[in-house]
Image (cartoon, rainbow, N blue to C red):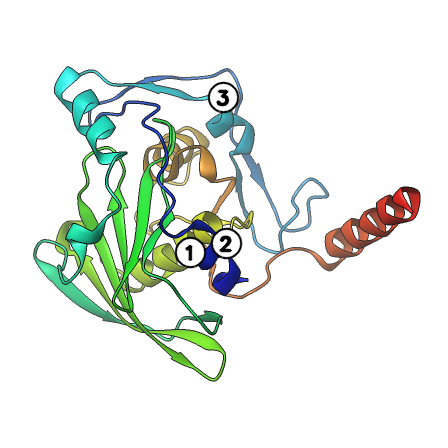
Amino acid sequence: MFKKLIQAVAGKAQPAAAIQSPAEQQNTPQFEVRQLSRTDEANPFIVDGYDCLSFVRAMKAEAADPAVAKKFASLREIIGSSYAGQLPPNAVEVKSSLEYPGEQVRDGMLYKADKMEQKWDIYLYQQHLYFCRSWTGTLVYVAAFAIVKGKIKLNAIWAAKEALSDDSSFAVREVDYLIKSHVMQARVPHPLPPDLAADSATIGQYSFAQYGNMCCFGTYEDTLPANLVKPERIKAAMEQLKAGSAKAS
C-alpha cells in the first residue's frame, strides 16, 4: 500500500488553494469533541479517546497575516527538493523501528496540503522522508529508511527540538500517524502528548492546530499497532463491501 501511494502521489504538483497562519484565526464550530471509552459502541477503535472528526471537519482557518498567506501560496508551488539533505532546527535523533509494506519508492511529494485546514506537507528524497508544516515550510521531522525484504523500515528519526515533549517516543508516534493518515490515507487515531490537558475543548483545539481536518480520534494510548479498528467494525465493512460487489455484478 505504501509503495502504491508513493508512486501515485510523488511528483504531482497541486494548486495553491488556501492560506494559513501560525496565529491563524479559527472559527470554532458548534460540534463538540466527544470522550469515548473503548467499550462505547460509537467508538470504532479499541482504545479510549476523543472523537473529534465532526469538530475538525467543521473548523475553518483564516490567515491573520497577509505575509503568511503569501508564504503558504508560494509553498504550494514547490516539490520539496530543497529539503533533501537537511535536518530540522536543533535536531534531536530518536530511535525508530517503524516499518511499512513496500518495495520501491520514487522521489517527490507524498502529501501536499491544498487548503488551510491541512497542516502538513510530506516529501521523499534520497531515502529520507521530510515532514514540514504546510503554512510555514518549517521542517519538523526527517526519517531515514531502508527497503528490506519488501518492507520500508525507518531506522532513525530526527525531530526539531521544539517539537519534542518530555516523552521522546511521541515523535515516533507522530511520524507513524502522519504516514498512515496522510500518505496511506487511513483513518486512524492520532497521538496526544502526555502533558496535554485531558479535556475535550483543549484536545479539540490541539488536534485541529496540529493535524487539521485530517484527524478523527485523539488518544493518549499507544497508536503504533498496525490495526486499532474493532474487529466487528472490520467485519461489517467487509460485509458491506461484498454486498456492494454483488449488486454491481
Farthest left residue? Answer: 90
Viewer-closest of 1 and 172: 1
Q: Measuring 51% from the left and 49% from the top, which residue is drawn there? A: 189
From the viewer's perspective, is the residue at label 3 or at label 2 nearer?
2
Q: Are marks 2 and 1 in contact (CB under 8 Å)?
A: yes
Residue carrying label 3: 58
* Residue ID at (39%, 34%): 212
**Residue 33 horizontal side relative to residue 127, left or right:** right
Query: Which numbered circle lies on residue 179?
Result: 1
Residue bearing mark 2: 184
Identify the amino acid type marked 2.
Answer: Met
User: Dividing the picture into quarters, in which one does residue 156 lie?
Assistant: bottom left
What is the quadrant of residue 14 in the picture? top left
Residue 220 marker: none
Which element type, helix, strand or loop, lies under badge 2?
loop
**Under tag 1, what secondary structure?**
helix
Q: Which quarter of the figure is the N terminus placed in?
A: bottom right
Q: Earlier in the sequence, mark 1 or mark 3?
A: 3
Residue lying at 92% horizontally and 48% vertically, measured from the top left: 246
Mark 1 residue type:
Ile
Residue 165 appears anywhere in the view: no
